Image: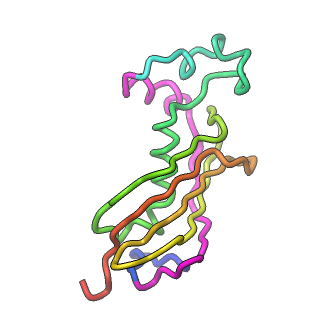
Amino acid sequence: MTPAARGTFYEDYVVDDVVRHARGRTITEFDVAGLALLALNTSDGHFNDDAMRDTGAGRSVAFGCVTLAVAAGLVMQDTGERAAAELELEDVRFLTPVVTGDTLYAMSHVAAKEGGVVTFDHCCMNDRDQVVLTMRRRVQIASRDD
């Protein structure tokens, strides 16, 4: 799939195509602690490094919904510019903790398309090439004839 500057139409997607999205996003302290608190997630795991010291992450980790939002944003330029409707998000899996300073990138696989709906398998990874999140997303995409 070759992303178009103004968005990709339904007809442009080809099943089994894969794109590595151009943008990356570095996670900040505000992303980890501030957004968790704004969402009323008061778990120590998001803003108390001392409480997290003896865990696998060793320090505060990003709230999963923040990681999900960043991943969704990273794929939008190539998979959402012509979206008429977001239909379904499923099989969201958080595989590796995200911490301050991680830079996230994303890839998308066109898993299926039928009747104006494209199914994407998205993968988000950090700057150490560790997969942090995977998800499946179904989107109604505008056609050139719309």
Q: On the image, which quarter does residue 141 sit in?
A: bottom left
Residue 70 pos. (x, y %): 49, 47
Q: 71 above or below 61?
A: below
Q: Residue at x 45, y 65 (%)?
A: 77
Q: Residue at x 50, y 24 (%)?
A: 33
Residue 121 pos. (x, y %): 54, 62
101 relative to 142 in the view: left or right: right
Quick one: which residue is furthest to the left in this view?
A: 146
Q: Residue at x 63, y 32 (%)?
A: 99
118 relative to 67 in the view: left or right: left
Q: 119 above or below 61?
A: below
Frontmost residue, 89 versus 124: 89
98 relative to 63 in the view: left or right: right
Q: Can you say which quadrant of the picture contains the N terminus?
A: bottom right
Looking at the rendering, the stretch of residues picked out in magenta corresponds to 11-40
Quick one: which residue is furthest to the bottom in this view?
A: 145
Q: Residue at x 44, y 17 (%)?
A: 42
46 inside magenta stretch: no
Residue 82 pos. (x, y %): 34, 72
